[in-house]
Image: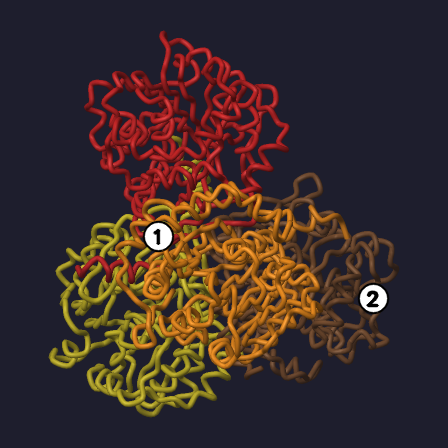
Chain colours: A red, B yellow, C brown, D orange
Amino acid sequence: MGDHHTIEDEREKAGFWFEEDVLPGLKVKMILKEISFNGESKFQQVQIIKTVFGKTLVTDGKTQSAESDEKIYHESLVVPAMLKHGSPKRVFIGGGGELATARECLRFPSVEEVVMVDIDEVVVNICKEHLPTWGDGCWEDPRLNLIIGDAYSNFESIGGKFDVVIMDISDPIEAGPGIALYTKEFYDMVASKLSPGGVFVTQSGSGDVHNFDDCMTAINRTCREVFDCVAPYTSSVPSFGGNWGFNMAWNSKDGEEKEEELKSWKTCLDINDRIKSTSHHDYSFYDGETHLGMFNPAKQLRRGMEKEERVITRDNPVFMY
Amino acid sequence: MGDHHTIEDEREKAGFWFEEDVLPGLKVKMILKEISFNGESKFQQVQIIKTVFGKTLVTDGKTQSAESDEKIYHESLVVPAMLKHGSPKRVFIGGGGELATARECLRFPSVEEVVMVDIDEVVVNICKEHLPTWGDGCWEDPRLNLIIGDAYSNFESIGGKFDVVIMDISDPIEAGPGIALYTKEFYDMVASKLSPGGVFVTQSGSGDVHNFDDCMTAINRTCREVFDCVAPYTSSVPSFGGNWGFNMAWNSKDGEEKEEELKSWKTCLDINDRIKSTSHHDYSFYDGETHLGMFNPAKQLRRGMEKEERVITRDNPVFMY
Amino acid sequence: MGDHHTIEDEREKAGFWFEEDVLPGLKVKMILKEISFNGESKFQQVQIIKTVFGKTLVTDGKTQSAESDEKIYHESLVVPAMLKHGSPKRVFIGGGGELATARECLRFPSVEEVVMVDIDEVVVNICKEHLPTWGDGCWEDPRLNLIIGDAYSNFESIGGKFDVVIMDISDPIEAGPGIALYTKEFYDMVASKLSPGGVFVTQSGSGDVHNFDDCMTAINRTCREVFDCVAPYTSSVPSFGGNWGFNMAWNSKDGEEKEEELKSWKTCLDINDRIKSTSHHDYSFYDGETHLGMFNPAKQLRRGMEKEERVITRDNPVFMY
Amino acid sequence: MGDHHTIEDEREKAGFWFEEDVLPGLKVKMILKEISFNGESKFQQVQIIKTVFGKTLVTDGKTQSAESDEKIYHESLVVPAMLKHGSPKRVFIGGGGELATARECLRFPSVEEVVMVDIDEVVVNICKEHLPTWGDGCWEDPRLNLIIGDAYSNFESIGGKFDVVIMDISDPIEAGPGIALYTKEFYDMVASKLSPGGVFVTQSGSGDVHNFDDCMTAINRTCREVFDCVAPYTSSVPSFGGNWGFNMAWNSKDGEEKEEELKSWKTCLDINDRIKSTSHHDYSFYDGETHLGMFNPAKQLRRGMEKEERVITRDNPVFMY
């Protein structure tokens, strides 16, 4: 049956493609090498495919994460917030069906409990089966409390405080289930459930110069209504079509200057030491220099944040393409 | 998991496509609903997919036959030649891996033996498993003598004469295994192995006005070197990208005028009676009126045949795109 | 600047494409060599482009006619109806902005007046400028009475009878201007304005086996409500994506049998003589054999006509994709 | 003719697309709104088109620069090197046909002469006409010495030293004219022609994690053979398909530690002050924070640089896709 290289070459000849919308008038087009799973859950279309980015989870026609760069995305989402806190014990994850967000949290020995709430059991099970390296067996870690259900209501009803709250959900699209999880109302609740020194982080859609104002700036603006310090940051995740956006937020300790605290985080030079004293993991993507690159986004993005006036609420939602 | 309609709608959103070359600068692009099989044999890439044309066999990136119109192709290839002969007993099929060509031959009660030689056992087996309605169980008919091997050398070595010889092989592409089966040398051998009243037919590539001269006219010209009567004809097979070409050829009986015989076949008005007295099958596509449509191709095609000067030989092969 | 061949090769490298929808889940994709005109009229987007099919008029994203096969389309639409009548003096054309339909009518020396009504002056002028061989100067023929306006109301108000009425308008799409021109109400008016022996013909959308029932069968069924004899027919027009459908209709003369008259037209063997004694033109596509091919469509199409129950009226319109 | 918004919406319906290869099996697909120029020079295909990224120069099917982000690319290429030097008087530009690289150099009042050598006069003239904001009239600045010719031989023969040498040429592709400009031989010559404190910078192809090792790492490795200090850096240029790579290089002054000098540049915190005291321009993209983001690339890229062993020479060239 020939070697790997030959098969891939031939497949290109066969002309199977996955075309994914980036924004109106812009698509990314990838050779489709395989459709390993092709079904639908109560909530969405679910596929496991293989492209030039390796194995990929696709829901409703959108890449959720891909083998070649899932570590960039998941390390970017999880590790800075964990290091900012320093010694997180209890973590909440909204979404995260691929289980890779939980994997990154559970690397930290300080962590005693990860509460993860994902709405779609089909996705979770398909990822365990088809993308086992994403979760890396973390579903057997007794510290993981995996709840299938609505993240909003489960977060609302669960008792106790959290040191880190991580939102790893789909972009806010019209009629999407996650729309409430991008509102000021939700962030107010997050703030009330963070322990002192607690940190919130949310994936925030595209961070590219031509569409960061689809939702990244609005999420940033909404966080600033609730939190003292909000650090927008980006990482390049090619399978998502370019730079990807995140917002990390916290309330400053008494007596500290917000501006100073934000600045010291953006130019923080002891990230490598922090890693050594906490997770002690040799990350694929994240380290001290990467940190500087991530947390110092380009001028256009910072100007976009400054100019943004939209505060997302239940009555004034914001939708992505 | 929702109904059929919903799944197809959603799949379009997902953006999986099969792009197939028609000619340089022209492609057909079909929604790819499924990849049921994805492998390679010793000879070629082999896939079973599902598109807007239904289940489809694809080899080396080219549609071989599709659920929605395989009957148009296979009836067009087989039935006219069988009816022209009238009461065929022994039939040879070169290629025909989907087993649908054999199916059509074996519908004729007069047939005592069908010798079918296909080079690719993987294709034959995959079609039995994934496209069972193509062969429709004909592989269990004891009249079928299925040989896996090279059609040229097997045809050469097999004893006896044939009433109908049918070539159902891939288009002549450079380095393709079938190239020798489109040469004057092969057609000379066919003529020598046809019984009196015997008929030869070969699929002949595209019959569309913009590319019938890729190979259809050259095959026609080559047949005319060997046979008295050559009837080029076309059928519309949408999954192949438009009109498809065939050439049917025979040597006239003593005393008959070639021109008259050809013309009487092209305007033959008793096809429905012939069907009733032979296969007695209610075809999807082929009947008396369809016959007139098929065997009276447009003026451009006929002019193309007249002007064609290429005779295909081993030393002067013709290649398609 | 290199020769023609080199430029085309390079352009393929440049990757400009025109993707055109055929039906949901099926597109044709053509190399786009040039955009010569790119504007919009009051009614539609209008472009003149160059593809593998040569210069092409595109309105609202749909190919209207292309250099490589416009003669197939226009000869198919016009010539059979003109020959059926035999000696047409007054002809009405609805639509026909490219002026090629008028060109074919005016080739007949018997013609004294062609009344052509097209709604879009921009299209007419752009075609004169960019596609001059389509109209071939016929706009200077004093027999052409070109009216810019609505075909329905102009046809209604114009006095006198017509020997041939030809509808060369866009497919019936929702909100398209031509929707009323595909209704029983319009056909009733046509019948009342045809002179004895008069013939009506309309382009009828795709005639391919997978979508002839989008509108071709419904137009056929509607014509049968109004006319004694309706002959559906098809021609292969590759730039339209495959076989294209037409319906030709007339009321039989007293005493003739409808079935017999239809059949004699479908198997008519003196087309070449009719051409010689009327237009005396050496057509690219149409002649006696082509006639047999066109008017004897495949069994599926004929079955589709028989089964069709939709009669198109203003209250029950039919829309294409 | 409707407003801008309507036209763009309709154009999407029309289905004109520009598909550009990123790497084998990955394409970017953009709505093509306009082809303003479509020709070829002695060296390459040249087009000016309009896409979702605005007006775009395309040569041989590759985006060269686009309205929406040309400033990101050109500021990234030019400004850091100019600031590193501090007060450049004489600058050499290899390539730079769009004239935007010259524009950025000439913003610095210290500059007395910019020698720019581009091979393709057609590109230079087309850009002046169709992309006038790129050059912004700088071609009338008497300090610009624009030479049409081969960059290698012109650089070789020109007398005197340069403070900054900037290579703004196409990626090294097989048979491309610029291949010699990416070799150690050329960099040796550059080093010999730099004045004390002089800085060299070259665009270096994709800086994305999945293909930065196509050539960015090899260019980095080759620079390190010739220069003491080499700073690889990236900027996100969406119209190029993601992160774009650059290498900036210089020889350290006597007595300075190379490692220290590199590190102090990567974490340089006085960029905003340097801008104020030199060009004093309010850049779209580049400022102090952007500098930190650019010069601290992700861990994978840095590891890729460390592992790279390919030194590009005339005898061992490296080619991109």
Q: Do we see residue D42 in this rendering?
A: yes
D198 relative to B205 in the view: left or right: right
**Residue extending farthest front:** D255
10 Å neighbourhood of mark 2: few (<14), some, or many (≥20)?
some
Disc 2 and disc 1: Cα gap in Å? 85 Å
D111 relative to B35 in the view: left or right: right
Contact, CB < 8 Å: mark 2 with mark 1? Answer: no
The quarter holding residue C164 reads bottom right
Q: Nearer the viewer, residue A310 or D128?
A: D128
Question: The numbered mark 2 sits on a residue in which chain?
Answer: C
The quarter holding residue D33 reads bottom right
Q: In which quarter of the image is the C terminus of chain D?
A: bottom left
Q: Position of residue D7 (x, y in %)?
A: 69, 51
Q: Nearer the viewer, residue B31 or C112?
A: B31
Q: Name the residue under label 1.
A: D257
**Residue extending farthest bottom:** B255
Task: Using the image, tell me which numbered label, if any, was put on residue C146.
Answer: 2
Q: Which of D24 and C36 is in front in this view?
A: D24
Q: Where is residue B8 in the image (x, y as percent from the top left)?
A: 42, 41
Residue at image coords 56%, 63%: C240
Q: Mark 2: which secondary structure?
A: strand
Q: Which of A294 and C58 is in front in this view?
A: A294
Residue type (three-letter) at the residue carrying disc 1: Glu
Q: Position of residue C234 (x, y in %)?
A: 55, 64
Residue type (three-letter) at the residue carrying disc 2: Leu
Residue at image coords 71%, 49%: D4
